[in-house]
């Protein structure tokens, strides 16, 4: 019964709650239910901003190498450990569920996933040009839900849009090959 409740809760959070005909955004759904307590997402001081002068001009191949290392070595989709100097501090991070500021993406990702039990692989090379960097991936994510540690697998594509003047990444966008609800319902415990 508990498993059923958790799956319904996670699916509801992933797709948004319907309240009197209106969709309540995911963050509100988490707050209104017990998600913040369950996931340990209580309010806390954000990490200090890291000064970000424009990244030194580098070739597309150099930038592709760093992004590749962020994904494969630092596992940044599951850990939020990435080369922050490549991103504008106002960059947004969007997945199939919501859009986050950089600090909220980092805090949320670190709290939501168990980095030691999660893994990300590139399924294509990182392709970089003057407007963006793009790659495809597959990942196995283990959620930091006490006692349960559900694991889901998904695949998709990431596009990192670049500012034409600075070359910094100004947005991160994930496109999943699966729907959020199918990912949640595929959870293994």
Image (cartoon, grey):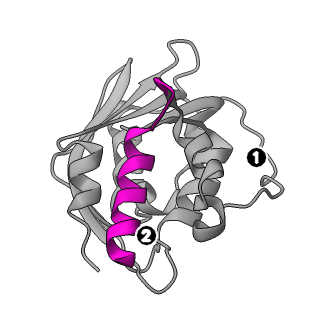
**Label 2–label 1 contact, CB within 8 A:** no
**Count of numbered badges drawn on the protein:** 2
Please say whether residue 127 is visible from this viewpoint. yes
Question: In this image, 50 relative to 161: left or right?
Answer: right
Badge 1: few (under 14), some or many (20 or more) residues near its Cα, within 10 Å? few
Task: Find the magenta span and give its range.
Answer: 1-22
The image shows residue 131 at horizontal and vertical percentages of 38, 18
Q: Position of residue 55 (x, y in %)?
A: 60, 34
Which quadrant does the N terminus fall into?
A: bottom left
- Report the residue that reaches farthest toward the top: 165
Of marks 2 and 1, the one in the foreground: 2
Q: Which residue is mark 1?
A: 50
Q: Which residue is mark 2?
A: 143
Q: Residues within 10 Å of mark 2 (few under 14, many from 20)?
A: many
Position of residue 30 relative to residue 127, above or below, is: below
**Residue at x 47%, y 87% (from the top left corner):** 147
Which residue is at a point 59% across and 30% down the rendered structure image? 91
Image quarter hosting the C terminus: bottom left
- The vertical placement of 99 against 14, above or below, is above
**Above-or-below relation of 148 to 20:** below
The CA span between labels 2 and 1 is 27 Å
Residue 6 lies in the magenta stretch: yes
């Amino acid at each position: 019964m508990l498993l059923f409740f958790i799956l319904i809760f996670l699916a509801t959070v992933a797709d948004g709650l319907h309240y009197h005909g209106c969709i309540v955004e995911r963050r509100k759904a988490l707050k209104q239910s017990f998600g913040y307590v369950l996931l340990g997402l209580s309010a806390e001081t954000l990490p200090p901003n890291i000064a970000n002068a424009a990244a030194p001009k580098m070739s597309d191949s150099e930038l592709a190498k760093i992004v590749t290392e962020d994904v494969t070595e630092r596992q940044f989709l599951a850990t939020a450990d990435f080369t922050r100097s490549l991103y504008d501090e106002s960059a947004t991070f969007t997945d199939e569920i919501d859009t986050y500021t950089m600090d909220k993406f980092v805090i949320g990702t670190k709290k939501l996933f168990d980095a030691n039990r999660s893994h990300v692989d590139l399924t294509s090379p990182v392709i970089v040009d003057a407007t963006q960097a793009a790659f495809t991936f597959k990942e196995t994510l283990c959620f930091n839900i006490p006692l349960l540690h559900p694991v889901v697998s998904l695949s998709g594509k990431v596009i990192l849009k670049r500012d034409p003047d600075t070359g910094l990444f100004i947005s991160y966008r994930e496109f999943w090959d699966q729907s959020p609800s199918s990912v949640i319902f595929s959870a293994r415990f």
